[in-house]
Structure formats: C-alpha cells, structure tokens
Image (spheres, rainbow, N blue to C red):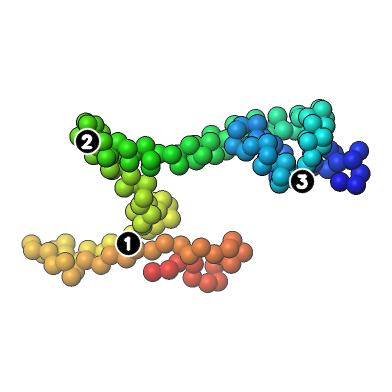
C-alpha cells in the first residue's frame, strides 16, 4: 500500500480480489468482510469505486461467474443452509398435512445423509459377479459384490505406477 498510484493496478491483476468484489456485488460478501480481508480504510474503499478499469474487471468477473454457474451455485449454497430449520418446522407442525410432514422428513434425511449412496455414480463402482446362473435355487454365497471408490490422491501421484483404488 506504499504506492497508492499503483495500488488499483495491482488489484486488477489479483484474481482473488476481483472474485471477492464480484461476490460482494452478488450479495455473498458484505462490504465489511471485503474491507477487513484486504485491510482497506473507508477512503481507499471509496477511491476503488472510482477506478474504471477495476470496475470493468469486476463486471467481467461477475459475467464470467454467471455464465459458468458459480454465482448461482454459491447463492444457492448460502440460502440452502436455512432449509433444515424450515423443514424441521414443517415436520413438527401438528396442523400440517401429513404428506408435507413426511416429505419434510425425507428431505431432512437426504440433507443429513453423507453415506456411500450420496457418492456420485462416477466416484463409486460396484462389481457384481453372479455364479448362480445355471442353478434353479440361487445360493447367496455364490454372489460376489465388490465396492470400490478411488482414493483421494493428488493428480501428480495418479501416474499409473501405484494402485489408485481402495477396496
């Protein structure tokens, strides 16, 4: 911050700052959050709004975030955290329709679930080998089921020299 003349120029090149300003404009961050993170005084904050190049960079980032879905996704994440309270209110309302109460129970259960069924299909593989094809009465011991998920390893390690799967 020693050279105030070059300060806005360095901020235009700071992708994190531009993204944070776009989030501020979208209502995801407050003015206080951005000012505190970057240690801005009120005077500096006001002067940043007068820099046309900086404003253009923020507007371009806002448009990029809308087009790639980041803005929508982050706004939805901000608002969805209120859902469990609303669902709980419906679930516990004795005057609510029974179907609505059951639906809220199912929705709460889905929000609370973090088990393997919540894993995306691409990240979970099930191999089922059924050896009972020629038998009239299948024996459950003749069915082999193997579930595998990829290990969370850095991309540099997944060069094929090591087994990237856990059983």
C-alpha separation, residue under disc 2 versus residue under disc 1: 45 Å
Asked if the residue under mark 1 is in contact with the one under mark 2, i.e. CB atoms within 8 Å, the reply is no
Rendering coords of residue 92 (x, y %): 27, 40
Asked if residue 89 is positioned above or below residue 132 in the image, the reply reads: above
Image x and y of residue 42, in percent: 78, 36
Q: Earlier in the sequence, mark 1 or mark 3?
A: 3
- Determine contact: label 1, label 3, CB under 8 Å: no
Q: CA distance from mark 1 to mark 3?
A: 54 Å
Residue 160 figure quarter: bottom right
Q: Nearer the viewer, residue 119 or 11?
A: 11
Q: Is residue 34 left or right of residue 124?
A: right
Q: For residue 64, say whether it is visible.
A: no
Give the labeled residue for mark 2. 94
Query: Which quadrant does the C terminus fall into?
Result: bottom left
Residue 127 is tagged as 1
Closer to us: 17 or 137: 17
Identity of the residue drawn at 35% across and 52% down: 113
Considering depth in this image, is 116 or 46 the residue closer to the camera? 46
Q: Is residue 38 left or right of residue 99?
A: right
- Considering only vertical position in the picture, is 133 above or below 30? below
| SS at circle 2 | loop
- For the point 86% across and 41% down, the residue is 7
Specify the quadrant of the image occupied by residue 114. Answer: bottom left
Residue behind mark 3: 39
Q: Is residue 11 left or right of residue 142?
A: right
Pointers 2 and 3 in contact (CB under 8 A)? no
Mark 1 or mark 3, which is nearer to you? 3
Camera-side mark, 2 or 1 = 2
């Amino acid at each position: 911050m020693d050279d105030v003349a070059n300060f806005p120029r360095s901020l235009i090149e700071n992708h994190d700052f531009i993204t944070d300003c776009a989030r501020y404009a979208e209502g995801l961050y407050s003015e206080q959050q951005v000012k505190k993170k970057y240690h801005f005084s009120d005077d500096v904050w006001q002067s940043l709004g007068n820099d046309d190049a900086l404003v253009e960079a923020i507007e371009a980032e806002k448009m990029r975030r809308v087009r790639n879905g980041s803005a929508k996704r982050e706004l939805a994440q901000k608002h969805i955290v209120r859902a469990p309270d609303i669902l709980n209110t419906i679930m516990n309302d004795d005057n609510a329709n029974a179907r609505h109460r059951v639906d809220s129970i199912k929705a709460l259960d889905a929000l609370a679930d973090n088990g393997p069924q919540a894993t995306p299909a691409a990240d979970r593989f099930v191999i089922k080998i059924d050896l009972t094809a020629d038998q009239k009465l299948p024996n459950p011991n003749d069915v082999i089921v193997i579930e595998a998920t990829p290990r969370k390893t850095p991309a540099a390690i997944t060069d094929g020299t090591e087994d990237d799967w856990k059983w």
